[in-house]
Amino acid sequence: MCGIVGYIGHRKAVPVLLHGLQRLEYRGYDSAGIAVLDENKKQIIIEKQVGKVKDLQEYLWGKDIKGSIGIAHTRWATHGPPSIENAHPHISKSGTIAVVHNGIIENHASLKEMLIKKGYTFKSQTDTEVIAHLVEDLYDGNLLNTVLKVAKQLEGAYAIGVISTLEPDKIIGLRKGSPLIVGLGEGENFIASDIPAVLEYTKRFITLDDEEIAVLTKDKVEIYDVNGNKKEKKPFTVNWDIAAAEKGGYKHFMLKEIYEQPRTITDTLTGFFSNLDNPVFRQLDRIQNIVIIACGTSYHAGLVGKFWIEKYVKIPVVVDYASEFRYRDFPVSDKTLIIAISQSGETADTRFAAIDARKKGAKVLSIVNVVGSSLSRESDYVLYTYCGPEIGVAATKTFTAQLITLLLFALKSGLERGNITASEFEEYHKKLNHLPVLINDVLKEDKVIEEISYKYHNAKDFLFLVEV
């Protein structure tokens, strides 16, 4: 997972790009870099550093790079170790094309071999450098058309940003399988892996779908499909501000998000009970089996949810890693409900597993945190967790919100199927409403928790005994 950001407008690009990288550093922090068209738009200036974004900032201190168009990247290594050579952006042979990329190009080896035969040389071990050379190799006088041709040759998941001295008035953004949003400003526009990267500059966004391409100038944005057909997409407005993505006085984001759990649970409860007419609850009489697919922490939420669903809904449940589900012939039908869980709604394995299941006739219910995310739009039904942005890599508030959502789904489904009474459902509702108070009481014991953690942090195994 890496983070990319791009800017075109009236400001100096470097400060905007560096601020964006700081917001995206949770996506990768082994190296960072920027590519900026100089003020004459005749040269691409590339600056990179191994380490965190602050290392790049310190390196750039005192350098007056005046260009107002640029792209930037913070890296989590997948191909090649952290190094200056492997850090993004990557530039083409002639220096006319610069590229940043988040994802994995599965056929990069064969493309690299083909380009080497044509005389291209490679300075890095990354799959991304292939893209820069391929854009140059296929350039036909029109950058959009060239990127469309490149897209047809790339296999894998990617979000890509491209700038060029050949057409210095634009940025091209391309997305397949990896998240990419477009920020809409006044006399300026942005691309980024995630909304917080540019939220202090705009609250209006467009989410790119798979195999969509955005062409940004400072005054407008145009969206195309992979065949070059222009598309109209309605922007949406984000209703939270950058303060929601800041540390809020806590030492780090994970600690902040631990303390946000009471509010998250309250918001998730409120959101769920304002949407009790969700049509998924009317489909359960025809469902014979439920499959929960997820990755990472979301998978563990699914393991807990299985017991609640089987207890209250009385339908058998299988929990599977989405990455495994995709590659085996798991029997699903139109009587199968897939519950796909993903905080971001962009987890590639979960998304593609859900898409495959829908093709076989299954209905898909997604449990996601990000409104308008790919998974939410690719599902038949959606339940949101209302957590706001989660910056910490380790899931905290999103995990508890997923648990709450799975329990609420099980209880409401059980009510609809006559397995619990209305009074029992209301009793559970009252108890859940009290849960944030109980969690706050636990968090007030943070000093005791810290002492216990310090005492036992080297232990390799724990046995938890709980009195119910």
Image (tube, rainbow, N blue to C red):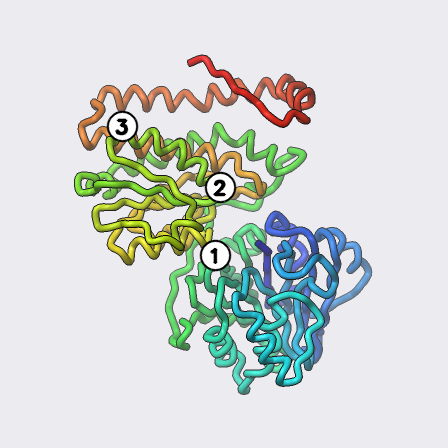
Q: Quadrant of the C terminus?
A: top left
Q: Which residue is mark 3?
A: 312
Is there a contact, CB below 8 Å, between mark 3 and mark 2? no
Q: Is residue 447 left or right of residue 300?
A: right
Q: How much space separates mark 3 and mark 2, taking CA atoms?
A: 29 Å
Give SS at disc 3. Answer: helix
From mark 1 to mark 2, how far is it between C-alphas?
Answer: 16 Å
User: What residue type is disc 1 on?
Assistant: Arg
Query: Nearer the N terminus, badge 3 or badge 2?
Result: 3
Question: Against 63, is 372 above or below?
Answer: above
Vertical order, 28 against 117 (above or below): above
Mark 1 or mark 3, which is nearer to you? 3
The quadrant of the rendering that contains the N terminus is: bottom right
Disc 3 marks a residue whose amino acid type is Tyr
Q: Which residue is mark 2?
A: 388
Would residue 300 be seen by someone viewing this image from the given angle?
A: yes
In which image quadrant can residue 7 be found? bottom right
Q: Does residue 1 lie above or below 434 as drawn?
A: below
Badge 2 element:
loop
Where is residue 312? Give x, y as percent.
Answer: 27, 28
The mark closer to the camera, 1 or 2, is 2
Image height check: is 391 above or below 174?
A: above
Query: In the rendered image, which residue does mark 1 sit on?
Result: 204
**In the image, is 140 to the left or to the right of 454?**
left
